[in-house]
Image (tube, rainbow, N blue to C red):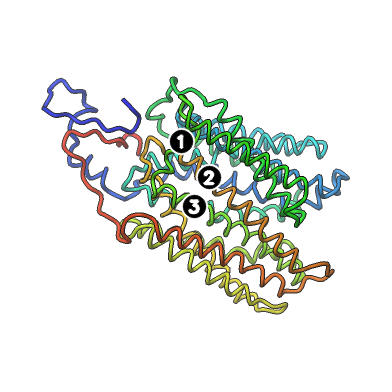
Amino acid sequence: MTRGTPESSTAPDTTTEPSQTAPTAAETAAATSDKLDPAFLRMAGVLLLALLMALLDETIVNVGVKTLSGEFGSPLATVQWVTAGYLLAVAVATPFAGWAVDRFGGRTMWIAAVSLFVFGSLLSGFAWSIESLIVFRVIQGLGGGMIVPVVQSVLATTAGPARVAKAMALISLPLTLGPILGPILGGVLVDAVSWRWMFLINLPIGLIALLLALRTLPADQHAGRPEERLDVLGLVLLSPGFAALVYGFTTAAHSGDASSPKVLVAFVGGALLLVGYVVHALRTSVTPLIDLRMFSKRGFTMAVITMFFVGAVANTLLFLTPLYYQQSRDFSALHAGLLLIPSGFLGAAGAITSGKTGNKVTARLTSTVGMLVTALGALAFSQIGSDTNTALLSVALGLTGYGIGLTAPGTMAFMYKAVGEASAPRATSALFIFNQIGGALGIAAIAITLQERLGSADDHPAAAYGGSYWVIIAFSVIAALSALVLPGSFRAEAPTERPTGEKDPFPESTRA
């Protein structure tokens, strides 16, 4: 039987196995209920602990760059690869994750990804040179790059259609908090303990998560699909192509020049590899890593486009706002990081709101409103000066966080419903890839815009930063328009009961 394809019986059969009998009233209620039971929440808590750990490490090193430069006697341009190497490894691993979940199962891949991440963290904590640290961060990034799509896929398929909106709201909590808490935690560890604990902190957290996983994660429903062959050529084309684009955008952001030879070579090389993947994916007899035919579904396409620009908005806010506080207002890195906290916590509140309203309204409403709220918060920053009240700015930044939190869960849930359970793992990889590219594009665009507005001046006038926020406003409005044209109505339809005798594609055993 094809994974996720329901079976139905046309006549009573007394020899049918218990798992194939008509669902009881209790089973039907469970299938159509949107409540997250305690067993699901325990499982989600373990999965999300690892997700938060991986997201923290995308930004935790940012405040330790100068410390690492002094520790190893290396220039900042080299030390930047401690972060860039991690992000590029994430880009390489992400396309592989969707196939791996299909092939080996979500539980198996989660354990493998977390184990690799913890191993890379251990090595990074004992690095003896900047070169060894960069290599070990790449190992860490390969594990971290699989954690995010694996967690999203497992929670979406385990929750089932009725509960997927609330499941995505849970995922949005670490997605909004992790990147903000990373620099704060990094600053505390560097100042109070040692730079090595930016990495070693993952050991106790990861080991606890792994031990809890053995008790709380259900056995893989399909126990892997041995017949699922890896699309090797697709991996060779897609992963380097994705990584090349991320490298190009990252290099452009650091240099402020999108026309430098390094950037152009990365863009051309990445584009050629991705075009090659498109040609290959449409012709191969092997199931492609990302099935491009999913884009024929308007719901999937518009959800991916929306999350592309959400990635751009979220990453540019986290890049530009601390820079304004540090360079234009002379705040310390830790002070600037603390001022981001309202965005994280209100982002979590927005995600909770999205989850609670998921059974009443669709992403067409929550995501459109969410991105317009984000644009409103960014509009306040476009008027900043050198002495603008930080309390008012915290409120404005909180609005941007709330809007992003309100947008992401519903959009992701909409995508999963559009493609169905069988395509969820590979759809997750596609979504995460486009979200990451959107983030890299956003940071590059804002860095180049800011560099042009600052010119060659040695000072950092607040007006230059304020004018750059119009880029974020534009991204937010485009995301709102993309969400507005999602198919369907604004009001959510009530979950429907399965026909008598039809097998539940999300069995109760996977929820406990």
Q: Is residue 302 visible?
A: yes
Residue at image position (66%, 51%) is 59
| 457 with respect to 181 (left or right) | right
Gap between marks 1 and 3, in whole Å?
A: 16 Å
Give the farthest residue toward the right: 73
Label 2 CA crowd tier, 10 Å (few <14, some 14–19, many 20+): many
Residue at image position (48%, 31%) is 288
Q: Is residue 422 above or below residue 76?
A: above
Residue at image position (26%, 43%) is 30
- For residue 432, the mark is 2
Q: Earlier in the sequence, mark 2 or mark 1?
A: 1
Whether tag 1 and tag 3 are in contact, CB under 8 A, the answer is no
Q: Secondary structure at mark 2?
A: helix
Label 1 CA crowd tier, 10 Å (few <14, some 14–19, many 20+): some
Q: Quadrant of residue 274?
A: top right
The image quadrant where one finds the N terminus is top left
| 88 with respect to 402 (left or right) | right
The amino acid type of the residue labelled 3 equals Ile
In this view, the mark in front (2 or 1): 1
In this view, the mark in front (3 or 2): 3
Residue under pointer 1: 291
The image quadrant where one finds the C terminus is top left
Q: Is residue 435 above or below residue 235?
A: below
Residue under pointer 3: 305
Q: Is residue 353 visible?
A: no
